[in-house]
Structures are given as structure tokens and as C-alpha cells.
């Protein structure tokens, strides 16, 4: 008996892996909690977009 039997459906390991349910993809959370330093002190903030200025900062 040969251990190298070819199959058009892939190896036994590949076929078993294809039968397993795929893990649910975690949605990307675009917002980030940040600390903002202002004239009134340090405050909690929520960063929802980062847009560079004209000078690249």
C-alpha cells in the first residue's frame, strides 16, 4: 500500500481543514480612545479619523 496516493481533492489534511468552520472575522474598530492635552488639562478623547495637515503633520 502506498502512502503517496494523489487526489484531485488535495491531501487528507487539506480536506479535513476545509471541513472545519472558519473562525468569525472580528470587525475592524476604526475609533481609538486617546488622551488629549489641552489648555484645560488632560482629557479623554475618541479618535475617529486622522487627517494630515498641509505641512504633513
Image (cartoon, rainbow, N blue to C red):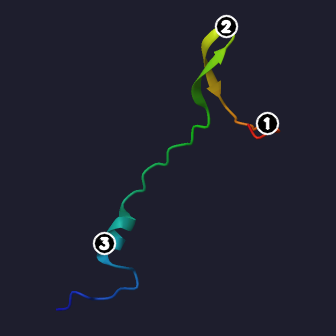
Q: Which residue is mark 3?
A: 13
Pointer 1: what residue? Answer: 53
Q: Tell me what residue is drawn at x 16 percent, y 92 percent.
A: 1
Q: Which residue is mark 2?
A: 40
Q: In the rendering, which numbered label is found on residue 20?
A: none
Q: Is residue 57 above or below residue 10?
A: above
Along the polypeptide, which appears first: circle 1 or circle 2? 2
In the displayed structure, does residue 32 sit left or right of residue 8? right
Q: Is residue 12 left or right of residue 33?
A: left
**Contact? badges 2 and 3 (CB < 8 Å):** no
Circle 1 SS class: loop
Which quadrant: the C terminus? top right
State the image coordinates of residue 11 (x, y, percent, origin top left).
Answer: 33, 78
Q: For the residues carrying marks 2 and 3, which lies nearer the camera in this image?
A: 2
Q: Residues within 10 Å of mark 2 (few under 14, many from 20)?
A: few
Question: Reading the chain from its start, which is encountered first: label 2 or label 3?
Answer: 3
| For residue 52, side relative to residue 10 (left or right) | right
Residue 46: percent from left, percent from top: 63, 25
> Foreground residue, 14 or 42?
42
How far across and down, in percent of the image, does residue 7 sit? 35, 86
Secondary structure at badge 3 equals helix
Residue at 40% x, 85% y is 8
Residue 35 in which image quadrant: top right
Is disc 1 surrounded by few (<14), some (14 to 19) or many (20+) residues within 10 Å?
A: few
Amino acid at each position: 500500500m502506498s502512502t503517496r496516493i494523489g487526489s484531485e481533492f488535495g491531501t487528507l489534511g487539506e480536506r479535513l481543514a476545509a471541513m472545519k468552520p472558519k473562525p468569525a472575522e472580528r470587525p475592524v474598530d476604526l475609533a481609538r480612545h486617546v488622551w488629549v492635552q489641552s489648555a484645560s488639562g488632560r482629557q479623554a478623547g475618541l479618535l475617529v479619523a486622522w487627517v494630515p495637515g498641509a505641512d504633513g503633520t
